[in-house]
Image (cartoon, rainbow, N blue to C red):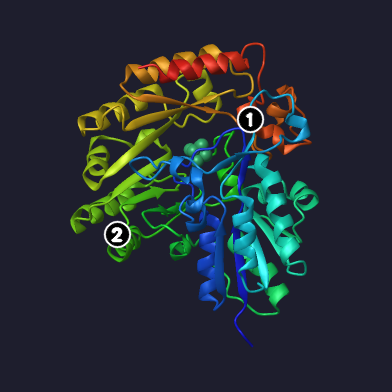
Amino acid sequence: MSAPFILLVNPWIYDFAAYDLWIRPLGLLSIASVLKKNGCGVHLIDCLDTHHPAMRTYADAGELQQREFGQGRFFKQNIPKPACLAGIPRNYSRYGMYTEVFQNELECLERPDAVLVGTMMTYWHPAVADCIKLIKNIFPDVPVLAGGVYASLCPDHAAACTGADYIVPGPFENSAVETLEAILHKQLQHIAADTVLRPECELLSSKKVLPLMTSRGCPLGCPYCASRLLSPSFQQREPLSVADEIEYWHVRYGTTDFAFYDDALLVHPEKHIVPLLESVIERGLPVRFHAPNGLHVRIIDERIACLMQRAGVKTLRLGLESADESLQKATGGKASRKEFTRAAESLQSAGYTEHEVGAYILAGLPGQCAQSVRSSISFVKDHGVRPYITEYSPIPGTDFWKKAVDCSPFPIEKEPLFHNNSLLPCRSASFTVDDLEALKRESRKT
Ligand code: SF4
């Protein structure tokens, strides 16, 4: 009997805006490593692949400029808005490869034994449904499983709306493995719950920039965040094995840039980030690192800032969220004003410039007023750090969900499309869409 063949699909993004900040289908790449260990054949179609050779033949491919470190824009086509978003005065687009390229990819494949579709934001669900529809057109009798973030946070909605045969919520590896065992009539090796998998990046078409996952979950429990729901326990990988992985990709493929996908990269620094960065420095690897997820501010002191600088950490985003002390307290106190000051000063004395260090500021939390965000922008700028506004997106199952349901003018409980942060889902008289636009302009002013 031949080895099972599993197709992995990372769907498009359908949204008002999307930007490639080193987005890679990490969940699918992790499950690919489990499947390969189990002797399965795997193939990935990444609809967000900006390096797909077939897309390069389109006239507009030249417009897709990558920025210095490999981040940049996606291919984009305007598409009709879902009916419930018709009143929103903005274009709505499909981001990623063109439909005909996806279809052609499917048609060229041998029939898989199963298809695993990864999902991300809850409000991108129409893209998942469209992907599955095309898969089903070509492989009508092949079971399709949907897992990942949306499938975990809204399993009933995903079961009703995506067309998938199986919804596999929770950590993708084991829930999908169990379902696959039943489909394939084959026993597969399960992964211990505390394992942080090394993703199977060989499947990516370009290896210039690769994702790194050195830990899973986060020990904090901010009330607006899904980290605990998606990864209930916090686990860190052995730092030297991460350094080996970095060296492997650099030597084998000349990879120059790595993006950390961790929610809590700096936690327990003495046994994690410090030995990791020291090992990278010792090996003399000419690589750069990017930390697009907010870093824990309170851990950054002069020593860590210096190590980050010497190891080549180029892009840093600090997870401040707010400089408003009452809001900091109400959201778990993950970073105080004093801790932010120390982190910003340490990074500057290590040689980081304003261009390299940014701080996330959350906007549009339930009950938040625009003035609170305005003060946070000033506070961040006063420290020589660049503010980045991140609009709040309500997430089912989080502590803030009920508050969000109560204050949102949109039916967010019924329709995940209204979780979209571009809509400012918890807008109010003291925080309007116009306020948000003004705050964004303010944050960009030098
Ligand atoms: S620190 Fe960051 S990842 Fe951890 S719970 Fe808070 S927002 Fe989530």
Q: Where's residue 204, x and y in %?
A: 46, 60
Q: Amino acid at mark 1?
A: Asn
**Residue 225, above or below 177:** above
Q: Amino acid at mark 2?
A: Gly
Residue 128 visible in the current orientation: yes
**Residue 248, above or below 264:** below
Left or right relative to 184: residue 71: left
Left or right relative to 425: residue 352: left
Q: Which element carries disc 1, helix, strand or loop?
A: loop
- Which label lies toward us, 2 or 1? 1
Residue 359, quarter of picture: top left
**Quarter that holds the C terminus:** top left
**Quarter that holds the N terminus:** bottom right
Q: Which element carries disc 2, helix, strand or loop?
A: loop
Instruction: Find disc 1 in the rendering and name its residue.
Output: 91
Q: Where's residue 197, x and y in %?
A: 47, 62
Q: Where's residue 305, x and y in %?
A: 26, 38
Instruction: Find disc 2 in the rendering and name its residue.
Output: 254
